[in-house]
Amino acid sequence: MLAKGPITPPQPLHVYSYSDIQEAFGIMQPGSHLGKLVLKAQDDDLVMVESSRKPTHYFDAEASYLLSGGLGGLGRSAARWTASRGAKNLILLSRSGTTRPAAQELMKELAAAGVTASACQ
């Protein structure tokens, strides 16, 4: 190969960052692309990862669920988790109620997701 002349990179050469990996694979998928696709790592690359696992627990949308400490740090996570798995009626017990900004934000977030959440102090 070297005897035939200088070695040059394949043409066309398309360089994609890891952030654009989905686009690069989309070009390759039909199998009709020409040239080479190269993935180049960069410090600011963001790659979206999708879980292949499906939730194993679902909640009855007609039932109501009582979460003690529901507006604290762990309680807010539990409220989001139950809502993401079908719970539509949450009763959140808390010593401080919705006085904290994080609690108010959670109530708005749940309402936007179609969840009826009641905070009880």
Image (spheres, rainbow, N blue to C red):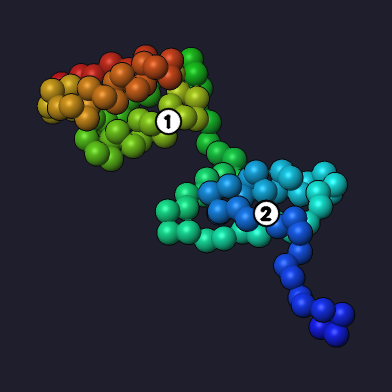
Q: Residue 70: image x %, image y %?
A: 26, 30
The image quadrant where one finds the N terminus is: bottom right
Q: Residue 108: image x %, image y %?
A: 31, 19
Q: Residue at x 81, y 83 (%)?
A: 2
Q: Is residue 91 above or below residue 69?
A: above
Local crowd at mark 2 within 10 Å, few (<14), some, or many (≥20)?
few
Give the amino acid at mark 2: His
Looking at the rendered structure, which numbered label has been put on residue 15? none
Given residues 1 and 41, the one toward you in this image is 1
The residue that label 2 is drawn on is 14
Secondary structure beneath disc 2? strand
Q: Residue furthest front?
A: 5
The residue that label 1 is drawn on is 82
Q: Quadrant of residue 68?
A: top left
Q: Quadrant of residue 112?
A: top left
* Residue 93 falls left or right of residue 16: left
Q: Is residue 119 above or below residue 23?
A: above
